[in-house]
Amino acid sequence: AETLLDKWDGVKTLLLEKTRLSGTLSPMFGTMEDMELLKLSDTGISGTLPPKMGEMTDLVDFSMIGTSLSGTVPDSVPRMDRLRHIFLGKSGLSGTVSAALGHMTKLKTLSMHSSMISGTVPQTLTKLTRLSQLALFGNKLSGSIPID
């Protein structure tokens, strides 16, 4: 059966912040390849980020602050080589900060604060020379701050 997401294949901007939306993200969500701007902050959206999220290769700005996300950031996210801003704070995300995020050289903002992230800050983040904001506070991180 065709879904709404199938009909929205060419959508480039989806702004649904501060709404009363709830439910989980469909696995099809990650296949919206033309999406450039996706803002779903301050909603009742829960569940995990779709494993195919990395197929959204045109995405530049991604924001899901203040949601009820759980699980980890999918391994496919570092393939989103146009991504400049990731805002995933104030959620139930867990796991570690992926070392692969250090290969996203165009990244300017990485905000994953106030969640359940643990482990260490990967050395690879020192490769993010365009990074102007790194917000990892309010997590269960340990170890030292990496230096180049």
Image: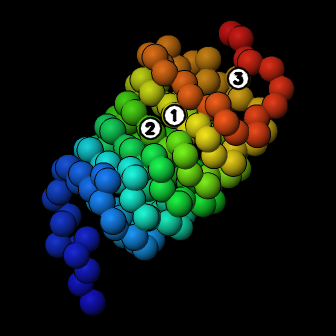
Question: Which element carries disc 2, helix, strand or loop?
Answer: strand
Question: Which dot marks residue 123?
Answer: 3
Against 86, residue 64 (above or below) is below
Against 12, residue 132 (above or below) is above
Q: Is the C-beta separation of discs 3 and 1 under 8 Å?
A: no
Q: Residues within 10 Å of mark 1 (few under 14, many from 20)?
A: some
What's the residue type where badge 2 is placed? Ile
- Specify whether residue 98 is in view: no
Against 53, residue 121 (above or below) is above
Q: Position of residue 147 (x, y in %)?
A: 71, 11
Q: Earlier in the sequence, mark 2 or mark 1?
A: 2
107 or 70, nearer to the observer: 70
Question: Which element carries disc 1, helix, strand or loop?
Answer: strand
Q: Residues within 10 Å of mark 3 (few under 14, many from 20)?
A: some
- Residue located beneath label 1 in the image: 111
Q: Is the C-beta separation of discs 2 and 1 under 8 Å?
A: yes
Figure quadrant of residue 69: bottom right
Q: CA distance from mark 2 to mark 3?
A: 19 Å
What's the residue type where badge 1 is placed? Ser
Q: CA distance from mark 2 to mark 1?
A: 6 Å
Q: Position of residue 137 (x, y in %)?
A: 64, 31
Q: Residue at x 25, y 44 (%)?
A: 36
Q: Residues within 10 Å of mark 2 (few under 14, many from 20)?
A: some
64 or 99, nearer to the observer: 64
User: In the image as oriented, which residue stretches furthest toward the top?
Assistant: 148
